[in-house]
Amino acid sequence: MRNHIRSLLVALSFTSIAASPSFAQTEIDQRNTEVVQSVYLRTLSVDPSAALVRNAQMAFDLAVRSYGATNSRTADMAVNLGRALNGTGQNEAAVPLLESALSIYDEDGDQSKLRYALAQYQLGVAHNGAGDTESAVAALTTAYTVLEPNVRRLSADTSFIRTALQASGGAAAVSAAETAAARMAPMTTTPPKPKLQIPPIYPPDESEKSVNGWVLLDYRLWPDGRVRDVYVLAASPETVFDISAAMALQQWRFEKPNDANQHHQLSVAFNAQ
């Protein structure tokens, strides 16, 4: 199975490399990128090896070729890969990917504010795991300052950031971040109005555990109100409900948007009862 997965990764990389520059933005090339990321993320949890760290860089390189080096979808890819590396304890490998994402989001303006803050959170986790507590506290404080008022507005919990701050900088770091967050006004964007809402399916392998949780999603809309570019910003617990929430939102339909490039956020709750 492992050799088959790596063969698939290599084949997809050759597909992208062989494509002429004029096809760099084609749907086929973008799909190659998404497949590589999907295969990589699925295999990383069972085989967190050095080879798969290299595959993470390959997936990011494919994203650069597919979407462009300064495209927000390339940054989204980098954060997903960094998040997966953090989840397997390979924190040093996560740092450069997350820094690449932050350099893109920083140029993308207010639309990427939440995604930028979540990248800062993952960077803080990476720095802390790599032993750089000073950098960890700085990144996590930046994340908490933005996320506390805005994620609370979306009814999602921010305790995961406070826990990370406590681990890296102690009570003083948590207190400083809370003080900074209290001065931050929440975003005032008007959410799109849904015409059709599909409830998420509770994952069957978790149903007997009485697990509650939530997933914070970022998405955009096509001009006709269909959903596109669904991206998991954060989740609690990690990875349990991600796919169910994203698949449900993908089926929603909204009123026609005024701006199809605008990013929106939605928090999806899962209650075992």
Image (cartoon, helix red, strand yellow):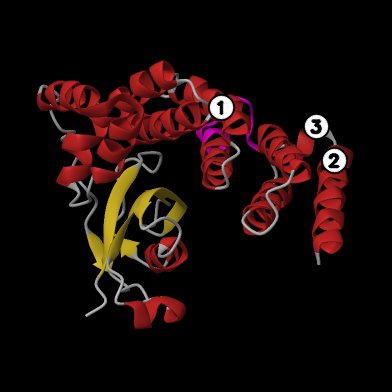
Residue 128: percent from left, percent from top: 45, 28
Residue type marked 3 = Pro
Residue type marked 2 = Ala
Which residue sits at x=71%, y=35%? Answer: 57
Q: Quadrant of the N terminus?
A: bottom right
> Do we see residue 255 in this rendering?
no
**Start and end of the magenta stretch?**
67-75
Which residue sits at x=30%, y=44%? Answer: 160
Residue mark closest to the camera, 1 vs 3: 1
Looking at the image, residue 156 sits to the left or right of residue 24; the answer is: left
Residue 2: percent from left, percent from top: 81, 61
Residues at circles 1 and 3 in contact by the CB criterion of under 8 Å: no
Q: Indicate which disc residue 19 carries.
A: 2
Looking at the image, residue 102 sits to the left or right of residue 271; the answer is: right
The local secondary structure at tag 3 comes to helix
The local secondary structure at tag 1 comes to helix
Residue type marked 1 = Val
Residue, disc 3: 21
| C-alpha distance separating marks 2 and 3 | 7 Å
Residue 35: percent from left, percent from top: 69, 55
Question: Which of 176 and 19 lies nearest the eye of the viewer?
Answer: 176
First reached walking from the N terminus: tag 2 or tag 1: 2
Few, some or many C-alpha atoms within 10 Å of disc 1 (few <14, some 14-19, many ≥20)?
many
